[in-house]
Amino acid sequence: MLIPENVLFAESHEYVRVENGIATIGLSDYAQQQLGDITYIELPAEGDTVSKGSSVGVIEAVKAASDLYSPISGEIVEINSELESAPELVNQDCYGQGWILKIKISEESELSGLMDNQAYKKHVE
Amino acid sequence: MRTVLYQKHVESGGKIVDFAGWEMPLWYKKGQSAEHHATRKNVGLFDICHMGEFDITGPGSKEMMSKLLTNNVFGMSDGQASYNFMLNQNGGVIDDCIIYKFNDEKWMLVVNAGNIRTDLEWIMENAPGGVTVTDRSDRTAKLDLQGPDSPKIIRDLAGEDVLNKFGFFKFRDGVVIGGIPVLLSRTGYTGEIGFELYFDSDRAVEMWDMLIKAGEKYGIEPCGLGARDSLRTEAGLPLHGHEIRPDVPALNTPWNFVFDWEHDFIGKAALLKIREEGSGHYTIPFIMSGRSKAMPGWNVNLEGVKIGNVVSGVISPTLENRPIGFLMSQTPLETGTKLTFNEEGKSRILEGEISDSPFVKPTSRMKMKNFL
């Protein structure tokens, strides 16, 4: 199971990678393994404003559907449109090509409430 | 509990889950969709050792099986298998099972893993003196080899003669596959042509390795319970505890073919009464309009009014990931009827409609020689 060092994690298994005030959000490797083959991702619209913990999409997988929660507050500046035709990218490369959306962070302080890779490792054990 | 193949599943990267008290693989490394497609296009191998097998022997066994089962036991020939419901007095389904006839006084009944004890108690309660019922589930391995390339694997390992005029729902006992004596049955739970192999559980690891090796050139995949569920749903086959249940009389289902109404069986009177009254539930296939699936337990609504619940829901890899399933309704519904689905207490509403089943055209009944 991959848990990279340079990302933060929410308890609901989304990851956050921060670069220049923009958070790239996706599902952790642990989460995609639990869900199995992902067949569809219902995504929000670019420009939507979201708050921490709100549902921003639905991940449809062979085993179950699960909500995707935003780990932080902000404005959605980009969604990964590749996932419309290739949702399996989340299974194949969740931290790379399988990223889901990008949020312009409005509350920097919320990041301190997320787990680092060590804490997340304990969380999923 | 674990089957004798548990270690194999772990070594093969199986994601292990609990199923009726058994630690079973849900899928392996390549994932459920790859396993599903392999079975439809090539061949899949399933560990089904958790299921139950009973030997039923002695004078009076035919009469007993006929009374316990819904299909035409008296009409069976030696070497034939038959799919059945076993009902309680209210017409609810204690279990669904396959009965194998060796001769009038020798039968094998194959039952669901979670129902072994209940079934055994029920059969013993109804067994007359002279009939012996032996539970040999622990010492019997069962592997399912399913898919259009499965006959080639059997041919390669046991010779082509074994498959000569081998019809659907027929079985051959004592077939030697790589030195292991097998009861080879042309049955399955995927809708594809294929086999169920019953043999000594001490040989299970050996058999598993042999089939995987022999199947390599045909693209064999080991398949978990996830693919088993999506395959059976596409093929329009019920899963006990979902489409068929002890607390729901088994009337108005897509599986009317399991009933031979000409003979007396336990539960028949209750079903006839329900049919006369026009009461009872309807078990009906549905297909979703979008790409999100309705899950078991979700509400089913007709014109905004709740009429029932989803009992099974899977994503269909063969239908390009359209979600399909079965629902239980209080009213009959025509194919094409538009419905909505929602989780109780949730506002997200999905759309779908009543479908026909099977959802995909299976190869299970086609001639064996077409696959060699």
Image: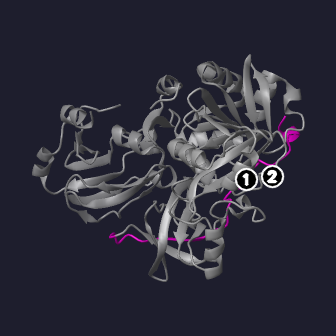
Q: Residues within 10 Å of mark 1 (few under 14, many from 20)?
A: some
Residue B226 visible in the current orientation: no
Q: Quadrant of the C terminus of chain A?
A: top left
Question: Alpha carbon of mark 2 to alpha carbon of mark 1: how far?
Answer: 7 Å
Q: Which chain is indicated by disc 1?
A: B
Q: Can you say whether B347 is above or below A62 in the image?
A: below
Farthest-out residue, left: A109
Q: Which residue is mark 1?
A: B66
**Closer to the camera in the image, A29 or B222:** B222
In the rendering, at what x and y percent does residue B324 appear?
57, 60
Numbered circle sitting on residue B74: 2
Magenta stretch encompasses residue B276: no
**Residue at 49%, 65% in the rendered image:** B310
Q: Tell me the magenta residue range.
A: B345-372
Asked which secondary structure carries label 2, the reply is loop
The residue located at (39%, 67%) in the rendering is B343
Identity, as a three-letter code, of the amino acid under mark 1 = Ser
The secondary element bearing badge 1 is classed as: helix
